[in-house]
């Protein structure tokens, strides 16, 4: 990757270490195009390593079996789901902004209050 102007930080990570239900290991890479950062390759490499270190801090110690994905899903009657399924016109009516992530959050918040 250095040949084409990138620096790379990589780790072999198991989904199991991050709360996944499989012990499958995969290579994860953080690639930074040095020319686009306005930094030296050494600084860009340190940035990539820092990003990867942040990811490594997200490891989860589960007391038993990992949670399955359905434990993370919202209930069908959650107001956020209704807000994200609104049309842009409905969202504009709700908060007066152009349609964006903030409008969706605002619409969900408005539904709670």
Image (tube, rainbow, N blue to C red):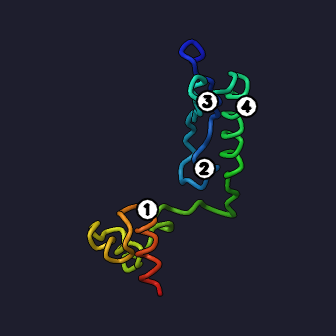
| Dot in front, 2 or 3 | 3
In this picture, residue 54 sits left or right of residue 111: right
Q: Dot 4: few (<14), some (14–19), or many (≥20) neighbours within 10 Å?
A: some
Q: Which comes before the other along the chain, label 3 or label 1?
A: 3
Real-space CA distance between mark 4 and mark 2, rounded to the nearest whole angstrom: 27 Å
As helix, strand or loop, the secondary structure at mark 2 comes to helix
Q: Which comes before the other along the chain, label 4 or label 2?
A: 2
Q: Residue 104 appears in which quarter of the rendering?
A: bottom left
Q: Residue furthest bottom?
A: 113
Identify the mark at residue 16; answer none if there is no mark: 2
Real-space CA distance between mark 1 and mark 4, rounded to the nearest whole angstrom: 31 Å
x%, y% of residue 67? Answer: 55, 63
| Dot in front, 4 or 2 | 4
x%, y% of residue 16? Answer: 60, 50
At horizontal 55% and vertical 53% (from top left) the residue drawn is 20
Report which residue position mark 3 lands on.
Answer: 37
At horizontal 50% and vertical 66% (from top left) the residue drawn is 72
Q: Residue 21 appears in which quarter of the rendering?
A: bottom right
Above or below, comparing residue 31 to residue 99 in the picture: above
As helix, strand or loop, the secondary structure at mark 4 comes to helix
Real-space CA distance between mark 3 and mark 1, rounded to the nearest whole angstrom: 27 Å
Q: Residue 70 appears in which quarter of the rendering?
A: bottom left
Q: Residue furthest top?
A: 3
Real-space CA distance between mark 2 and mark 3, rounded to the nearest whole angstrom: 33 Å
Seen from the viewer's position, the closer of residues 34 and 24 is 34
At horizontal 44% and vertical 71% (from top left) the residue drawn is 74
Q: Which comes before the other along the chain, label 2 or label 3?
A: 2
Seen from the viewer's position, the closer of residues 96 and 68 is 96
Above or below, comparing residue 42 to residue 20 in the picture: above
Report which residue position mark 1 lands on.
Answer: 101
The N terminus: image quadrant: top right
Determine whether label 1 and label 2 are within 8 Å by CB.
no
């Amino acid at each position: 990757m250095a040949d084409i102007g990138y620096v790379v930080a990589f780790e072999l990570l198991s989904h199991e270490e991050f709360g996944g239900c499989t012990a499958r290991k995969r290579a994860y890479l953080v690639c930074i195009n040095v020319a686009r950062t306005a930094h030296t390759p050494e600084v860009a490499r340190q940035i990539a390593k820092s990003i990867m270190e942040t990811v490594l801090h997200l490891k989860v110690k589960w007391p038993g079996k990992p949670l399955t994905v359905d434990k993370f899903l919202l209930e069908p009657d959650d107001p956020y789901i209704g807000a994200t399924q609104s049309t842009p016109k409905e969202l504009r009516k709700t908060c007066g902004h152009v349609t964006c992530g903030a409008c969706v959050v605002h619409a969900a918040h408005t539904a709670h209050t």
